[in-house]
Image (tube, rainbow, N blue to C red):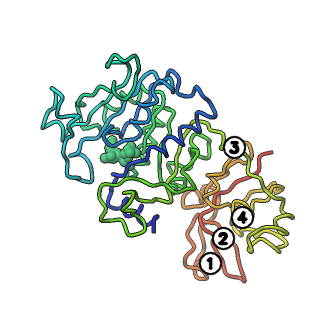
Amino acid sequence: MANQNLSNAKTAKNDEFYTQYADIQKEINAYLDYDPHVFRGKTVLLPCDDPEWSNFTKFFAQNFELLGLKKLISTSYAPESKNYKIPYQPTLFETVQPYYSPDKTKTHGKIFVLERDITGDNRINIDDLEWQYLEGDGDFRSKEIRALRDEADIIVTNPPFSLFREFVAWLMEADKKFIIIGNMNAITYKEIFPLIKENKMWMGNGFQSGNAYFRVMMLKEYANGVYDSETGLVKFRNCCWFTNLDHGRRHEPLRLMTMAENFKHSKHKEIRGRKEYIKYDNYDAIEVPFTDAIPSDYEGAMGVPKSFIDKYCPEQFEIIGVAEGDSGKELGLKPFDRELKKLNPSLRDGQLYYKENGIPKKPYARILIRKKQ
Ligand SMILES: C[S@@+](CC[C@H](N)C(=O)[O-])C[C@H]1O[C@@H](n2cnc3c(N)ncnc32)[C@H](O)[C@@H]1O
């Protein structure tokens, strides 16, 4: 149900859900544990973040000195440009300023900069944020925000999910360091998977037990059990962090059993008691239906679930490819002939299959990996 609600949000292009402070803190701490100086002397850009709503801005502004930042820039998107029109009321924070404009407040984005102590308390913190209206609406694709991107060293945000592919391309074209939130399904997008395969992007440290709770503005599309009226939060199970900054968990190899140990002790009935792993008919690899059932002593290719990527340690495994659509065809998986499709009409070209009692069966989306020598 939670997954369903994320896809509902996608269909309706509702990008208005807001990340919790504790989730941001937990994630950023993982990079600091690995390298305490990761943010030192750096300019951080938060390109989808209005401090009135965004805990990203709050977190980085409050921890400006602790992180040793050089500059923090946070930009917001104009209310009238948003897909979802939420009843809009400028806050006192904005209206008390002499440069407040009743027109611009709806049609222009804003830029918030933190760089120096303006309150005179000898500290640089959230009280020193200075803001102005942007020339445009704050679209991350605009020339104005591109220039800020180019100025930044590290870009951090929960970007609009409906523009995730574009957002990643925007980061990559400027070759920036980033920490962003996205949908787990993005792993196999044809624009995203090659980046993961080439270790240009990987999963971040992660949400608490894989569950992410966001604050939302519009509740009508969230079913009971997904929206908690007490906390005002909506639960999305398939959200994750993507990054190209290192953290410790990424370098922790999976602790795995040998093939023989799996046959004897695996907790999965599909593996325990077997004499061998299933082999695919259209690719020289074994089918491994669970990440914790990857045999530690198998040297050849293995088809593993997509969720493996969250446990992927580049020193332990190499990624060969994803067996889906065009990527599967690039791996050399031949299109299915009529006979096979007659036996199993759900077969899709580019996917792996194996025969069970003469009937071709396809596993769920598989990523092909191989143990590193
Ligand atoms: C998923 S929300 C996250 C907000 C905030 N980063 C957070 O995590 O709390 C994404 C935000 O990006 C804004 N947005 C949508 N399209 C945008 C665009 N083209 N450029 C910049 N921001 C955009 C949305 O209005 C929304 O507020």
User: Is label 3 within 8 A of ligand 1 (CB to nearest ligand atom)?
Assistant: no
The residue singled out by tag 2 in the image is: 353
The disc labelled 4 sits on which kind of residue? Val
Mark pair 3, 4: CA separation: 19 Å
Residues under numbered marks 1 and 2 in contact, where contact means CB atoms less than 8 Å apart:
yes
Query: Is tag 4's residue or tag 1's residue first in the polypeptide sequence?
Result: 4
Query: Is tag 3's residue or tag 1's residue first in the polypeptide sequence?
Result: 3
Indicate the position of residue 15 as horizontal and vertical percent values: 34, 52
Question: Where 199 sits versus 44, above or below?
Answer: below
Which residue is at the front of the view, 123 or 12? 123
Q: Quadrant of the C terminus?
A: top right
Indicate the position of residue 224 as horizontal and vertical percent values: 39, 70
Indicate the position of residue 314 as horizontal and vertical percent values: 69, 43
The residue singled out by tag 3 in the image is: 314
Asked which quadrant contains residue 152, the reply is: top left
Query: Is tag 3's residue or tag 2's residue first in the polypeptide sequence?
Result: 3
**What is the crowding at mark 4: few (fewer than 14 residues within 10 Å), some, or many (at least 20)?**
many
Residue 190 showing in the rendered view: yes
Left or right: 255 as drawn, with respect to 120: right
**What is the crowding at mark 2: few (fewer than 14 residues within 10 Å), some, or many (at least 20)?**
many
Residues under numbered marks 3 and 2 in contact, where contact means CB atoms less than 8 Å apart:
no
Mark pair 3, 2: CA separation: 27 Å
The residue singled out by tag 4 in the image is: 288
